[in-house]
Image (tube, rainbow, N blue to C red):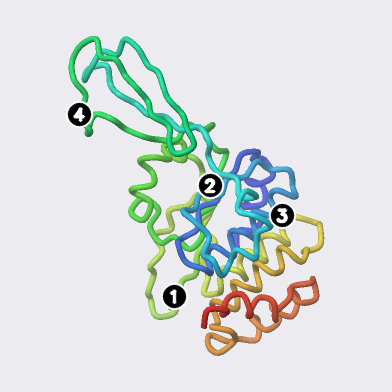
Amino acid sequence: MEFQESKNLIVSSKNICLIPAEDPEAICSALALFYTLKELGKNVNLIIESIPENLRFLTPSLDFISYPKNFVISIPNTAAGISQISYEKNTESVKIFLTLESGKIKKDDVSFYFSETKPDMVVALGIKDYSKELQNKLDSFGFLLDAPIINIDREPNPEQGVHENKKFGKINLVEEFPLAGTVFGLIKNISSNPIKAEQGNCLLSGIVVYTENFKKNLTADIFQTAGELMKSGANLQKITENIYKSL
């Protein structure tokens, strides 16, 4: 796998965005990478709608997850001339008041997006088709466009000629292996620090999800990876109790 090329790109990048697919395996893997990149001194944004309740034990608090903060409301001058802007803020909401000098504003004239520094790179996890799956998000997260991408994904049946991933990345780490296993290999390649319990819990959680608590998709490599993670401090009992607590 292209771990060395990935390492070179990560080492040379300061601002990094992580975008996991909206499934537990990808989220667990992204959280493990988030911890690692933070430890390496990177400025990391995790672009995610929310973390499922049964995975929140993997984060100290939701505030720990960095997220774009500069939000822009845009109205084109061709729609209306605005002479004055004011706002009112209370415990329930923020209201923005516009005084029009000319023209009129329709709902379709107003656009909303985040305005952030363009990241040096993006890591996509579990995403098959970047442009298609993130179409709605990219309207708001325009600052992600044109950044180099490390594409990490699991290809289910490559030996049968089935290729779901569009290989959209500058670097494509697409293997017939759990996402957590690929991310584990990447983490060991980019960091000389030993895997800590918080990273291990995230990665082992990803494996638990992928194998449905070691009931399917089992291989010798998966057991070896799980063993390494448990030696690093990952707590399998805590993981299974949280992931399956609602069952």
Discs 3, 1 touching: Cβ within 8 Å: no
Q: Nearer the viewer, residue 8 or 39?
A: 39
Query: Which residue is denoted by mark 1 in the rendering?
Result: 158
Q: Which kind of residue does numbered mark 1 sit on?
A: Pro
For image coordinates 46% across by 53% down, the residue present is: 49
**Residue that extends furthest to the bottom in the rendered view of this protein:** 215
The alpha-carbon separation of the residues under discs 3 and 1 comes to: 27 Å
Label 2 sits on a secondary structure element that is: strand
Q: Earlier in the sequence, mark 3 or mark 1?
A: 1
Q: As shown in the figure, which amino acid type bears the numbered disc 4?
A: Lys
Q: Residues within 10 Å of mark 3 (few under 14, many from 20)?
A: some
Q: Amino acid at mark 3?
A: Ile
Q: Residue at x 79, y 71 (%)?
A: 232
Q: Are discs 4 and 3 less than 8 Å apart at CB? A: no
**Disc 4 from disc 3: Cα separation:** 50 Å
Q: Classify 173 as above or below 106.
A: below
Q: What label does residue 190 carry, if any?
A: 3
Q: Determine whether the residue tagged by mark 1 lies in a helix, strand or loop.
A: helix
User: Residue at 65% of width from left, 47% of height from top?
Assistant: 10
Residue that label 2 marks: 122
Estimate the x, y position of residue 188 in percent, counting from the top left: 73, 62
Numbered disc in front, either 4 or 3:
4
Q: Are marks 1 and 2 in contact (CB under 8 Å)?
A: no
Q: Quadrant of residue 4?
A: bottom right
Is 51 on the left-hand or right-hand side of 107? right
